[in-house]
Amino acid sequence: MSGLKEIRTRIASVKTTRQVTSAMKMVSASKLKKAQDAILKIRPYADKMHQIIKTLSTDINENMDSVFTCPREPEKVLIVLISSNRGLCGGFNHNIAKFAAERVLLKYNMQYQLGDVKFICIGKMGERQVKLRSMDVVRSCNDLLDNIDCDNAYALANEILADFSNGKYDRVELIYNQFKNAAVQLNMTEQFLPVKIDDEEESGTYFDFIYEPSRKYIAEEIIPRSLRMQFYKALLDSNAAEQGARMTAMHQATDNATELLKELMLQYNIERQTTITNEILEIVSGAEALNNV
């Protein structure tokens, strides 16, 4: 350091930064509690819906020929990437965008070369990363994150279902951060359409239920409902993961600012002590010089 004034300026700057990061950490912690409660409440319902679809899987495959369950060759692929509109959350956005790009290049490289891989981006940060990688973003739904509710999520999910039914896309995948805890977020990909209902682990399980009015009617009603719920759950998962990532990032930033502040205070005291020592030496030297005159 060149002087005490510069050190004091840096100390004041670090203190201000620590106050900001500490406040952001508390705000994120408050939002995380609400987001965590929402995703933990909806997961059992979504899982039960998925279990019902698996129970109906035999008749769906053999008799119903549902447009949402019939497998297709993935010639035209839609990736729904869920990130966030804001930064300051560590590698939350960069990691999920990188994960999506790598998946496209590894699994759908031929379709990508032909220009048949499209993105719907929910979150400004993920959209920016995708565009930097020169991938085709056909739609941005960033406003959806400002007010995550089932009506808005269902509306977008219905549009995607309609595009799939009309043959605009042959496969739709959701890519998002799954919330595990405040410090851990998992990069997840889910095949949204067509519905994957074959499960080798449950292939030997069979339930003989009586359905009213009919199994076909229930399947036709519950599959779109389950898909809308799956889409809404992915949004809630990503939102909770974002708040956890931001809280963790701000906690680390606050700790780093505290450590830096300790180092600056130590450097300031050393510099101040050196300055005082030099001044004392100058006074003593001057007094000795006068005594020798």
Image: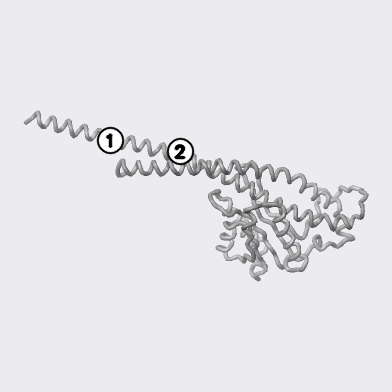
Q: Quadrant of residue 162?
A: bottom right
Q: Earlier in the sequence, mark 1 or mark 2?
A: 2
Which residue lies under the disc numbered 2?
258
Disc 2 marks which amino acid?
Answer: Thr
Q: Tell me if mark 1 has few (under 14), some (14-19) or many (20+) residues whose alpha carbon lies within 10 angstroms of its own.
A: few
Q: Quadrant of residue 287?
A: top left
Residue 31 placed where, x, y %? 61, 44
Residue toward you, 143 or 47: 143
Q: Tell me if mark 2 has few (under 14), some (14-19) or many (20+) residues whose alpha carbon lies within 10 angstroms of its own.
A: some
Point 30% across, 37% down: residue: 271
The answer to whether mark 1 and mark 2 are in CB contact below 8 A is: no
- 79 versus 256 height, above or below: below
Disc 1 marks which amino acid?
Answer: Thr
Q: Tell me the number on the disc at residue 197.
A: none
> Which corner quadrant holds the N terminus?
top left
Residue 54 placed where, x, y %? 83, 51
Point 71% across, 67% down: residue: 76
Q: Is residue 89 found left or right of 162 in the rendered image? A: left
For the image, the number of numbered tags is 2
Q: Is residue 147 found left or right of 25 in the rendered image? A: right
- 44 versus 290 height, above or below: below
The residue most toward the bottom is: 114
Which residue lies under the disc numbered 1?
274
Q: Quadrant of residue 247?
A: top right
Point 83% across, 50% down: residue: 52
